[in-house]
Image: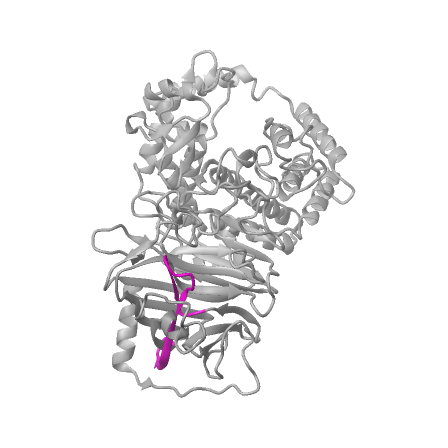
Amino acid sequence: MRNTMNDTRQKVVLSLLLVFASPVVIGQDPPHYRRADYVNESVGLNNEHITVNVHKRSEGWGWAEVFTSSGKLMAVMEHLGEIMFRDQDIPARFAASAYTKIAGDDGESLVFQVESVVIRDKLKGTSFENWMRYPYTEPAIKGEVTITLAKDQPMIRLSYNLEATGNYYARYIRGPWLKVGEASFGIDKEDAILPGVEWAINDEWTSGTDWFKDPWALRVAPHPNMVAIPLMAISHGGDAISMSWDPLQVATRWFNYRDHVQQPVFAAPNFIDRMNNNIMGLMVPDATVEGHENEVYARNPLELKIGQSIWFDAEVWITPGSSLDAVTGWVSRNGLPRPPGPRWPYEETLDRIAGAYNTHFWHEGQGFGILQREEDRIRPNVPGFMERYISENEGSKLADELRQKVNWTLEKTGAGRQGDADRTAALINRAETLLELQQEDGSFRFDPHGWHYRKDDFIVAASIVEPMGLPNDTALEIVISPALELLDIARETDLEQYAVAARRAFDYCMHMQRPDGGDFWETPIHAANLLAAGNAAIGYYEAYRTFADTRYLEKSIHFIRSLIPFTHLWEPNDIPMRYNTKPVFSSSDWYFANWVRDHVQWEVLSVFARSSVRGIFWGDIDGEIDWDRFHEGITLAAVRWLNLQEERKWRPHNLPETYEAYLNGAYDYCYPDTHNSITGNYGGMFIMPDPIAVNIQAVLDRKRSRE
């Protein structure tokens, strides 16, 4: 972004007229923002989508206000940059004595030659001069700040090209810095999203303790690797404002010191300043050194040298709708990234997985599986990919050996022996059980000690900390899963009452926007959750197929798009993580596992595996997003996760005794439960690779269908 913006600016300067604009006197209509000195001079940029008015303080230009096309004040840009010295208690804002207005093919720009205010000079001739003496006698920072309004888009481009004039220690240097809702709607919001980190709705706080306990709850300036998409957004009243940046852009570096990238800062409400607004901004130093997250005032200051450059670049967009619409808007503009390069060709990957099932995943007289805990037992089952793999490789030695194992499994489980009448009776019995659990309003309710009991995590959490979900509470996943089950039973039994019950449940959830409840067995049930998003997308699409109600189609698209904020659409230079996913924006059991730091891939794999088995291909349903590319991306990411013991990338956590089996190759071609976004290490229990194979088969089907 940095080089592109510089090139664009140079071309504009060389080829277009430079207009030295005279001040615009606002007269009787002062700015909305009243927490800034104002000398009755302003200059504006506007198009049919957005207006930005830049104002002048007594010290110079600038601060700004950003409006929608309807005149709604969305945000105040508090300054053109600011530095906080280590040894000075007053921050020094950047100001300009004049500006240049440039008209170009891509829009209009305001260019400000800025320098940091010298606090010492501002005290001269005042009563403070004799008892306050600040050491700096010249601006510490000089440079150029450019504000460009796109000609025909609701976008403002902010570009900062700064330079240190001497050797200083800075607790922060702030670049683009927006106070969203200031002087207008305040802290009121519909939702706020920092992908991979936050998804707060209504009056929830970002960095709140709803889904974490301190110290994990604080996520105001997270490690940049935790941010899944370089964008932050806040919505109010049908309008969303977002700020995006290049996460790989070096913001500053001196000589052979370490790079600093642009550090996102996100707080809704603005608990940093304890003000009635919301913060989204970029600063240095960054938090790429572990242990320095959330330092909006750095404990170890940034050491600036004379001539050191500092760059910030950002785009501010106004988008109709919610913060999720702002996220999908970013994807529409930028496209989904290229999927990871294949570790092995698809067919070879299937062969490797099938070979593992034929060797160390097979336990004679027991079936397919792996043993990790003392209580683990192998139970006969046929992996979902295997019948197709065998038929497509018929005649090979591997396929023949797998056929023998599958036949033994089918015989052992009695598959196919159950008559139609018996199966129908079992389905009806299950449906009647669900009807007994369904409430009058169509919902289903959380029962942690009853039908939702899977693990004792929430019982332990309630006894030691607090409940992760209250009995009789409800959430999207708590309702959608039984609704889809009822719908499937209605189709198979042709009994209308089950379809009616399912529809009541789907209608109950129509008001829900943020997916929640998918990992209820170990996480707070109202935390934003990927599994809930995927299950709701499938459920609503099946409801659309059954009832031909376009409201359900729209809802299915909304929830499949809700997967995007959980998905890494970039990666740092040193850790492959493109298309890795976060399961939930919370922690397990309040403290145990940090799902903002760690990736989990099995949930997104299950969503797309089950979609493909049902003949649901999201690329045919939602044309705005390249879902085939997304599907391939999350599948190839999972192939990257496949374990080979000689690589030594994995460590156990709660089962240290499994490490010896790992070293002996017992888990080769399994994939681990978690990946650490900061260290790049894998951990957790191992998962069988069947879902990866099913997704590979589905990806290949889509590729062949387009040939």
Magenta region includes residue 86 = yes
Helix, strand or loop: magenta stretch: strand
Magenta region includes residue 308 = no
Farthest residue toward the front? 130
Residue 289 x/y as whole percent: 35, 45
Residue at image coords 58%, 70%: 183
Which stretch appears magenta?
A: 79-108
Whether residue 513 is situated above or below residue 601 in the rendered picture:
below
Image quarter where the N terminus lies is: bottom left
On the image, which quarter does residue 213 sit in?
Answer: top right
Residue 182 x/y as whole percent: 56, 67
Residue 109 x/y as whole percent: 37, 77
Q: Which one is nearer the viewer's eye here, 261 or 46?
A: 261
Farthest residue toward the left? 255
Residue 185 x/y as whole percent: 61, 66
Q: Is residue 670 left or right of residue 270?
A: left
